[in-house]
Amino acid sequence: MTEDALKTDAVALKETYGEMSIAKPAGGATLIRISDAPLPKGCTPSSTPALLVIPGQGRPVLYVKPKLKLSNGVEPRSTSVVTVEGEEWMQFSYNFPWDENTNSLVQFVAAGLRRFAKLE
Amino acid sequence: MKKNNLVEVRIPLHLNALLDKSLAFNSWHESVVFGLASHARLRHKTLLLVKKIFPLPAEAYIRGAAHGARWHGRAMIPILNEAISEKLGIIIFHAHLHRGAVSLSGDDRRSAMTLLPMFQNSVGSRPHASFVLGEDHAAGMVLMPEQSGFQELIRVRCLGNAIRDLECNEQSISRGLPDEIHHRQALLTGTVGEQSIKRAKISVVGLSGGGSHVVQQLAHMGVGEIIGIDGEKVETSNRGRLIGMTGLDVLLLRRKTSVMARMVRRINRRVKFTGVPHHLPRQPAIDALKESDIVIGCLDNYHAKADLQELAWRYMIPYIDIGMLIRPDKQSRQITIGGNVLTLIPGGFCQWCNDFLSEEKLKEETGGRPRSYFEGSKKQAQVVSFNGTLASQAVTEVLKLLTGFAPPTGEFTFKKFDGLEGTLQNWIVKKKNDCSCCLNLLGGGDPVWEQV
């Protein structure tokens, strides 16, 4: 993802999700932390901090905080707790097409979080 | 001054020798070395994690009548540029190489009061500092982000084959006699070594076959605090190898941390035990680990070892890892009983450097799928006596790090265990120059978040 595209998408993310911050640790990835991203209706909690890791090349990765429950009270399957930059995050599986030339990070985050609307 | 104002500077193994050499007194001036550092905030202290050092070149110094050092401001430009680009704090080191207390001179203080705010203007998100190092003490001034006053309660920790702490003058370094319990241990470790043991905070991650042995021995050794990290409760199958456990613990569904707390209490009430009933990398486990002086990993899966490796390198914590594999082959009637004890000193080799950790090993645990599919390690053969051998060696490695009783070997090595032969042998390993863990994670500290 180019620097310009990243800046444009960061502004769009801020307009959509409100408070957020960016870090660029060693290794070339960019981290975007959204303070309070809303989850699909019925999930508990109703919103969560979210972390978007944008590597130098390839598809971004989205994380949320652990202990999330779906609207039926069940914990989502195929998740695991991992450490990113010394902090715990929940990694989860999702499957949707994404092309950095045509899709935006706002679409990526929205599609990722929609995974929790699906009951298991 | 409050205890939580302590600033601890950690210098990794690979930079220690260069720093010492570069700080040696020149014929007509003190030598100055610049360091670039990240930082991390803990509950009771702030860590400054030195990632790079830059000795000032000879031509940068200005000849003058004074005994100290003066240098051309332009010599700092490349250092300042790198600090800005990498978002790192700048540390100025110089030395007063004698035993006993050292202090910043009037010139040193005036120089720090001018330069550190200038550095803060360039990189406001990291602390900046000026230190003078003696042979066994250090002193310094630290300017924290968004502050204008200087902190002077500091410690410089040099990470090598032994951990060498240079305390500042304000901290009392107790030289009391060893207690009666450890009188004979002190014949090896010495009075100063005993004080290091009593101040040490050691994390043990994984409290089953290996970890319970380690906790027991650390309690006997008399360390200051043991942080036991394990999210599991005891099961009947643990009774074959979990030291200190009883049948009643299974009936009462006790946590492994509770069993360890009881064992430590019975051995020595002066040893503090803090149980963290969570698995790594849950946040309470990460937060507890960050506070440790040394961490011992007694884990049976590569994913957890990878997490521990990352955290140890990020916060520059010496990490001792033990691992064992018993492979009974009923068909060929051949058995291999192997194990390793790795002492990983930040700045030395890591587990990724020598394929103790590899992407292939991680993939094998998840069947090639993402980590979210990892369901725990397979049940492998475990025998209490073999665990005990590795755990004993791990505790000896702790003793070496804390007291420096053993001379350095001069090479990177690890201990390889052969359970059939009953031997522990030194095997030489190399540090990989292009290891991404060592290049990117070492001293990473806390990320610097900037509001958008």
Image: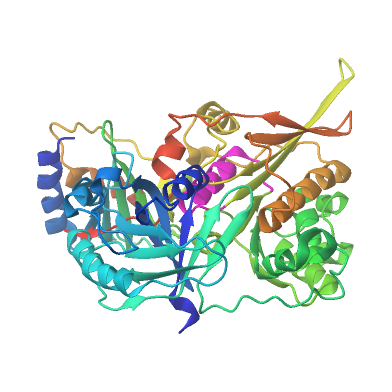
How many numbered marks appear?
A: 0
Lateral position of residue B122 relative to residue B46, left or right: left
Q: From what the image shows, is residue B116 above or below residue B383?
A: below
Colour convention of the picture: rainbow
User: What residue sits 12% from the left and 46% below the top?
Assistant: A7
Lateral position of residue B219 relative to residue B103, left or right: right
Q: Is residue B313 magenta?
A: yes
User: What residue sits 84% from the left and 62% below the top?
Assistant: B187
Of residues B217 and B175, the one drawn nearer to the viewer in this rendering: B175
Q: Residue furthest top?
A: B332
Would residue B263 be seen by someone viewing this image from the given angle? yes
Would you say the magenta stretch is mainly helix, strand or loop? helix
Q: From what the image shows, is residue B206 above or below residue A44?
A: above
Q: Which residues are magenta?
A: B298-317
Of residues B117 and B57, the one drawn nearer to the viewer in this rendering: B57
Would residue A85 be seen by someone viewing this image from the given angle? no
Q: Where does residue B365 sit, x and y in percent of width and height?
A: 59, 33
Q: Where does residue B224 sit, x and y in percent of width and height?
A: 69, 70
Q: Residue furthest bottom?
A: B1
Lateral position of residue B444 relative to residue B422, left or right: left
Residue A60 falls in which quadrant of the image? top left
User: What residue sits 15% from the left and 41% below the top?
Assistant: A104
Pick the quarter of the image with the N terminus of chain B.
Answer: bottom left
Q: Is residue B250 magenta?
A: no
Of residues B372 and B394, the one drawn nearer to the viewer in this rendering: B394
User: What residue sits 76% from the left and 77% below the top?
Assistant: B270
Of residues A14 and B185, the one drawn nearer to the viewer in this rendering: B185
Q: Where does residue B419 sit, x and y in percent of width and height?
A: 85, 33
